[in-house]
């Protein structure tokens, strides 16, 4: 009787290694595509956030005849606003238009001071609000007052409490941020030439350069190039020395104040920064590759390249509007840009 031997077929070691190598190559090719798809989705959500903010701003305008103030100067409120207390910011004003009327009513925006509100409702003023956050950003929900004391306000017991973080910043100026409106709408040194500043009441009729040519809101990231840029503070801005929020025309500082709720194009989009708490902290930035998204006055959202034309320079003692990005900030600089 003969016994037949059956041969077993299988992978050789070389064949197995080849298959593993092919799979690794396919994964390496697929991962960037997956990451790009995810970023495209995040960027789309960020765009939708800005669109909703645009609708809220326009609905506010329909009710009150103007866009909300950059912040409400409450130094004249009963008891005044001491150093390190807070002023209500533009983001608090549009809460009802963003389906956040219960929060607006709970905080009693405009009736209570911001300091009274954070004392009574600390959790609400420190939690994350996705409508004001870019999904591509990696920042915390709340500013750490131990790291960023200027991105916080004191409660009535004088405890410094970090504020909620936002990635959306109002447009203020071409030079460094300023509280007061410009006396010369073509010169950022004379004051803010943008749409948002102290007690501002800018309406569509004040945007002489055209609503589709004017930035209302832009992005700012938590980090840029590995350096903390701090994004912004939501609902509230901190007072400095009883002079209102720090700005170039009041108690100058670059670690607190107006720059936490408003932005400037004194520096380019996505500027090179080497340390936190510098002039560049008031710039616009994002983690979207190559630029930022901005909300224009007509409610549309556009992507601006970080390489957009910007001259940002003194001419004599003035800071004139003489570039595309600057002209998009000014509301009445008599410079209308074409397609950008």
Image: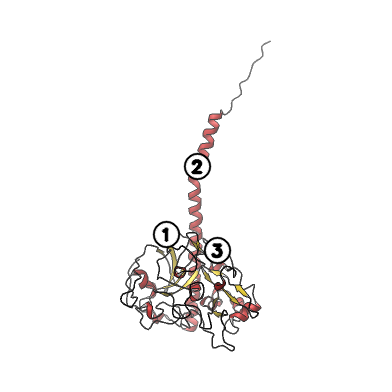
Under tag 3, what secondary structure?
loop
Label 3 crowding class (10 Å Cα cut-off): few <14, some 14-19, many 20+? many
Tag on residue 290?
1
Marks 2 & 3, CB-CB < 8 Å contact: no
Q: Which residue is mark 3?
A: 139
Q: Nearer the viewer, residue 31 or 151?
A: 151
Image: 176 above or below 5 = below
Q: Quadrant of residue 96 in the image?
A: bottom right
Q: How is the image coloured?
A: secondary structure
Q: Nearer the viewer, mark 2 or mark 3?
A: 3
Q: How far across and down, in percent of the image, does residue 36 sit?
A: 48, 53
Q: How far across and down, in percent of the image, does residue 321 sit?
A: 33, 74
Q: Residue furthest left?
A: 316
Q: Which residue is mark 2?
A: 26
Q: Quadrant of the C terminus?
A: bottom left
Under tag 2, what secondary structure?
helix
């Amino acid at each position: 009787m003969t016994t037949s031997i059956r041969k077993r077929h299988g992978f050789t070691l070389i064949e197995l290694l080849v298959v593993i190598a092919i799979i690794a190559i396919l994964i390496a090719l697929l991962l960037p595509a997956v990451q790009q798809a995810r970023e495209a989705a995040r960027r789309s959500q960020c765009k939708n956030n800005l669109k909703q903010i645009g609708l809220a701003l326009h609905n506010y305008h329909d009710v009150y005849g103007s866009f909300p103030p950059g912040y409400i100067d409450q130094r004249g409120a009963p008891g005044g606003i001491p150093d390190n207390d807070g002023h209500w910011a533009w983001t608090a004003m549009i809460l009802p238009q963003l389906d956040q009327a219960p929060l607006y009513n709970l905080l009693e925006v405009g009736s209570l001071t911001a300091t009274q509100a954070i004392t009574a409702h600390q959790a609400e003023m420190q939690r994350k609000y996705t409508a004001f956050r870019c999904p591509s950003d990696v920042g915390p929900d709340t500013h750490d007052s131990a790291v960023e004391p200027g991105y916080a306000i004191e409660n009535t017991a004088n405890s410094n409490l970090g504020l909620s973080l936002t990635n959306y910043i109002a447009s203020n100026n071409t030079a460094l941020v300023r509280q007061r409106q410009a006396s010369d709408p073509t010169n950022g040194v004379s004051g803010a030439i943008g749409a948002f500043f102290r007690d501002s009441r800018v309406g569509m009729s004040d945007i002489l350069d055209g609503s589709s040519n004017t930035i209302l809101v832009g992005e700012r990231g938590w980090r840029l190039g590995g350096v903390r840029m701090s994004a912004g503070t939501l609902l509230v801005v901190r007072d400095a020395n009883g002079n209102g929020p720090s700005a170039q025309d009041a108690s100058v500082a670059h670690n607190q104040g107006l720059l936490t709720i408003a932005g400037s194009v004194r520096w380019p989009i996505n500027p090179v920064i080497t340390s936190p708490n510098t002039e560049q902290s008031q710039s616009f930035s994002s983690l979207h590759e190559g630029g930022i998204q901005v909300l224009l006055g007509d409610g549309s959202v556009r992507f601006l390249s970080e390489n957009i034309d910007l001259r940002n320079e003194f001419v004599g003692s003035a800071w004139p509007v003489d570039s595309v990005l600057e002209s998009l900030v000014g509301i009445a600089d008599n410079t209308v840009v074409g397609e950008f």
